[in-house]
Image (cartoon, rainbow, N blue to C red):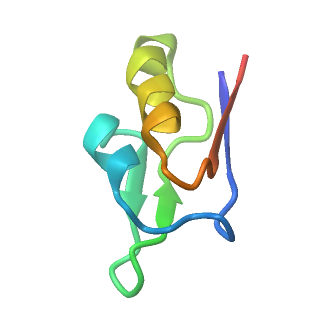
Amino acid sequence: MKIIIDEDKCAGAGQCVLSAAEVFDQRDEDGIVVLLDAFPPDEQRAPVEEAAARCPALAIEVLP
């Protein structure tokens, strides 16, 4: 799995971090998403897909 983030779309809501804190974080200064692991293990698939689904700005893309 590969994760792509569109920082320009990110609204800083933090739903991704709540769903998959091992994969996502937020910048302190503006709350924009920080991708900690662009290629997380398959065990992280469910929380990563949940994070993408919960993102109000649709800034997270999960590729196979």
Q: Is residue 62 above or below residue 16?
A: above
Q: Residue pushed farthest top?
A: 43
Residue 62's place in the image compared with 14, above or below, is: above
Q: Quadrant of the N terminus?
A: top right
Q: Is residue 32 left or right of residue 6?
A: left
Which residue corresponds to the image point at 65% horizontal and 64% vertical from the top-left?
9
On the image, which quarter does residue 62 sit in?
A: top right
- Please state the horizontal and vertical placement of residue 57, each as a whole percent of the image: 57, 55
Q: Is residue 51 left or right of residue 39?
A: left
Q: Position of residue 64 (x, y in %)?
A: 73, 16
Give percent across and percent down for residue 63.
Answer: 73, 25
Q: Is residue 41 left or right of residue 64?
A: left
Front-most of 25 and 61?
61
| Total number of numbered discs in the rendering | 0
Residue at 48% x, 46% y is 55
Q: Furthest residue to the front?
A: 56
Residue lying at 50% horizontally and 24% vertically, measured from the top left: 49
| Residue 31 image offset from top left, x and y in percent | 39, 74
The residue lying furthest to the left in this view is 18
Question: What is the quadrant of residue 19 in the picture?
Answer: top left
